Amino acid sequence: MRLQSISRRQFLKLTGSALLTLGFGQLTPAEAAAQRWQPLHTIQNSLDSRYIRQIITADSRTSRTIMWQADKPEPSAQVEYRTAGSDRSALAAAAGGLFTDDDVSSYIYTAVLSGLLPGLRYEYRLLVGDAGTSWYPLQTEGSPFFKALIFPDSQCSDHYETWRTLVQNAARRHQDTAFYINMGDLVDNGEDHRQWQQWFSAVDGIAEQWPLAPLLGNHETYTLDWQIRQPLAWLAYFSVPENNSSAFSHCYYSFDYGEVHFAALDTQWEESDPIQPGLLAEQISWLQRDMKASRKKWKIILMHKDILNYDYWGGSREPEDVIDPVGRALMPVFDELGIDLVLSAHLHTYRRRCHIKNFQPDPAGPLYICTGVAGNVRYYDIPASHFDEKLAPQPETDNYLVLETAKNRLHIQAFLPNGALMDEVFLVKR
Ligand SMILES: [Fe+2]
């Protein structure tokens, strides 16, 4: 049998069909609740599924996306979920299909759990017929205050061992994290199936229990021969919240957590315009609508590419204009929208900048942090710009960040791989 790949559009259509089949949107909440809870299913065989993962949704108080992969089709796959320890459960149908990339085929499944209650501990498992997995924990958002782990570029040349060590240790140290973010360039080559396997293997035990908010980087858009393509694997692996774009569906998105509204941007327009033009203009228009519609206290931008260029690498003086085209395009929009914090990556260096407005140091503008590197690909001797207030210890290693919110306060901490604090900063808003 000849294997057929499904397109992203077909994949999304299947997901939507599954939701309609479940009747979401057709029942009243009371009817849905009454129908939902049934005795637990009996499991007679173990299920051979892998890379089981939670993906962030727009509203983590009431919903969560579950995804996984399998070598064989899993018809009628479902996610069974319950409040922790309960003897009654509910089912969410999964949708999915065959995905072929880098000459490797697998089946990718997605189920959306909706109608969850805020602040509850749930458990979920995968079901296919009488086969199933063990239960995994799932916590819905229940407090205005939370902690999140933030990982910069995880691309590696060491079979993702640096990434594995960093992410596993960070998760062990911060078991109270609500979710984790990977800032793009998850892998070095977006078409390389083996690298994706290694990335997923590295987050084993983490991906099942905490939702991921992934960003698109430039490396997700590279073919095996380093040409630009659509980020097919990233889009297939991570069903992030919808942005209602026809050309760039799921490439950028937003979500709420606690008192924060996050926008995760796609900064790839300079490279992707030749194959799919229009990303920048469309995204700015979306971001203006999206941020203005949010009533959240804090507004945070997550974006892969950075606002500065360090092309004066090698000892020459900082140029007059150190702001790169990405910064030139987006920073005025961030000024206009009252963004509090902008987190970027891509340069594989940790830089806490000052607040910047109108391209100048200004306490009235957003705080900018280039988050560093979470893999083993290092760029050395990057000069400091006049915007940079704090650098990582030199020569740099990998690192991660923790964002913690409290009443009237954001607390951002940067850690070395051994857990030592290397920088922290507070943002306060009454
Ligand atoms: Fe990058």
Image: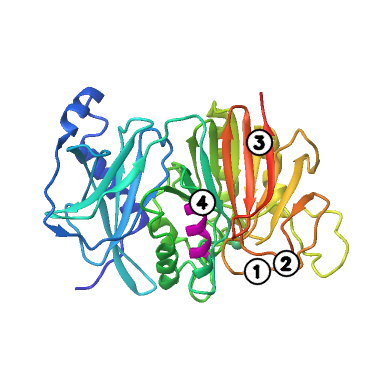
Q: Which amino acid is tagged 2?
A: Pro
Residues at marks 1 and 2 touching, judged by CB atoms closer than 8 Å: yes
Label for residue 173?
A: 4
Query: Mark 3: few, some, or many residues within 10 Å (few <14, many ≥20)?
Result: many
The Cα–Cα distance between marks 1 and 2, rounded to whole angstroms, is 9 Å
Magenta stretch secondary structure, dominant: helix
Question: Which of the two marks, 3 or 4, is nearer to us in this view?
Answer: 4
Residues in magenta, as a range: 163-173
- At a point 38% along the width and 36% down the height, the residue shown is 140
- Give how far across and how far down residue 86 sits, in percent: 21, 37
348 within the magenta span: no
Residues at marks 1 and 4 touching, judged by CB atoms closer than 8 Å: no
Within 8 Å of ligand 1, the CB of disc 3?
Answer: no
Determine whether, in the image, residue 276 is placed left or right of residue 116. Answer: right
Question: Which of the two marks, 1 or 4, is nearer to us in this view?
Answer: 4
Q: Which amino acid is tagged 4?
A: Arg
- At a point 33% along the width and 48% down the height, the residue shown is 66
Earlier in the chain: of badge 1 and badge 4, it is 4
Residue at mark 3: 340
- At a point 50% along the width and 65% down the height, the residue shown is 187
Determine whether, in the image, residue 199 is placed left or right of residue 377. Answer: left
Q: Which amino acid is tagged 3?
A: Asp
Query: Mark 2: few, some, or many residues within 10 Å (few <14, many ≥20)?
Result: few
Question: Which of the two marks, 3 or 2, is nearer to us in this view?
Answer: 2
The Cα–Cα distance between marks 1 and 3, rounded to whole angstroms, is 29 Å
Determine whether, in the image, residue 146 is placed left or right of residue 57. Answer: right
Q: Nearer the viewer, residue 392 or 265?
A: 392
The image quadrant of residue 133 is: bottom left
Label for residue 378?
A: 1
